[in-house]
Image: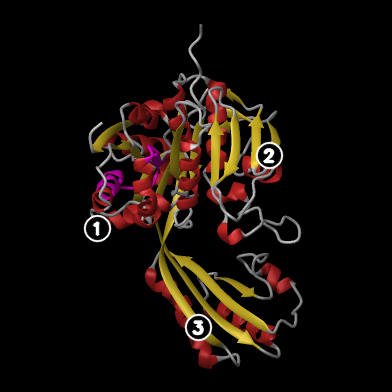
Amino acid sequence: MAPPLPAPLLIGCAAGFSGDRTDAAGPVVDTLIARLTAPDAPPGQRAFLIFETLAERTLALAQLRRRADPEAGYEPLLDAMLRPVLARCLAHGIRIVSNFGAAHPRAAARHIARMARELGCAVPPIAVVEGDELASPAQRERLGRTLGPALDGLRIVSANAYIGAGPIAAALRAGAQIVVCGRVADPSLAVGPALAHFGWADDDWDRLARATMAGHLLECGAQVCGGYFADPGFKDVPAPEAIGFPIAEIDADGGVVIGKAEAPGGLVSEATVKEQLLYEVHDPAAYLTPDVTADIGEAEVTRIGPDRVRLAGVRGHPRPSAYKVNVCHEGGWLAEAEISYAGARAEARARLAADILRKRLHGLAPRIDLVGALSLFADDAGRLLAASPPGDARDVRLRAAAAHAERGQAERVGREVMALYTCGPAGGGGVRTSLTPRLNTVSCLLPREAVPTRFEIVEGTA
């Protein structure tokens, strides 16, 4: 007789990016606990909470924070996101996986251990996943050969590979209750728990692809629950100020049901799932991740109950032989400045101010937007603004922006906008200026063997 299949796995997501709502985890954890302790909960039911807090440049910003403070470099909202739910997760066996380690997973693990002690909890086994940061001389030399002249003269801030779920699963099998990662691919945060829970082989492509798409649906947080979906009068979402974040139920074959936390806001529907399913997918038949090449060309999305949608028909193919790598480097300075014009002939005065700035800021080629008249659909060169007939907008905010390698040149933008106070045109006010260092990115592929990954349990005992 075949052994019984493992119980379905519950994975809740409490963050879709760095800066997401810090109170999202509470309802997710409450819902997971209710499902784990329900009288009809299947034996062996397990639950995970994931936080996805990295974007393309977030890691470079974290690396800059680490340069300034050796104990910084991880998710700055870690405490606000995790502290309110950590004790309940530990008490109910809800394991936590996240990339909030950013540029310094070990410092994040130390912070979580301190947090547990302050909450009166025993420090759980906390693992860090490493290997994504390409810092060794051999790796930098390989990057140089791969990128060639594109890397010449760059002042590198960070270089990281998008690694996969393997070390996450290994850490969980070794007893880690919390796994802190740096740059892993977003869906891998869910694939790792699925690998560990179900014991799938790392070349079980169909199941890996299904778990990958579950992770893809989860990793943007509220988007699949109506957040980014909402468009009033066309796609209405109840109580968007209190959206319940998503929870996926994954079975032993990789079948996926998407639901949400018990909260007054949000919805999960066939439409929200379809939108998120296609989000950031370059080729539906070949969605490349470090774990698998997922194929959703024949995927089926079916509503099976209130706020419950099943995803089926996902297939998988062998994973790519290389990892994607992002190299972030110093990119000079970005200057921005704004001034407002209001009342009669406001748009005409704002257009005159724009003309003055273009002539004064020769050599900088600033982008100038007239917020309230023409901004989102404008172009950097100002051709659309010049070709559009003046309107009669009575509330216009002029925004000028320019980038330059030299700080002194970039600072000219703020000075020239400030000068409009008295140099005209009439009635300008509310000037605000900012100057920020820029980060630019170049990307490439590196063979998997050039990016060895590992995990280590650094706090608690397994």
**370 is higher (above) or lower (below) than 113:** below
Q: Residues within 10 Å of mark 3 (few under 14, many from 20)?
A: some
Where are the magenta residues, as a range?
Answer: 92-113
> Which residue is most to the top?
1
Between 115 and 151, the one nearer to me in the picture: 115
According to the picture, the residue beneath numbered tag 2 turns out to be 305
The Cα atoms of the two marked residues, 3 and 1, are separated by: 33 Å
Residues at marks 2 and 3, CA–CA distance in whole angstroms = 53 Å
355 to 193, vertically: above or below: below
Spot occupied by residue 113 in the image (x, y as percentages of width and height): 25, 46
Sequence order check: which comes first, mark 3 or mark 1?
1
Q: Secondary structure at mark 3?
A: strand
Determine the CA span between mark 1 and mark 2. 49 Å
Residue identifier under label 1: 69
Considering depth in this image, is 158 or 88 the residue closer to the camera? 88
Q: Earlier in the sequence, mark 1 or mark 2?
A: 1
Q: Is residue 172 above or below residue 271?
A: above
Relative to 63, residue 254 above or below: above
Work out whether residue 207 can be spotted.
yes
Mark 3 is on which residue type? Answer: Val
Instruction: Name the residue type under label 2.
Output: Gly
Across and down, in percent, residue 138 comes to 29, 34
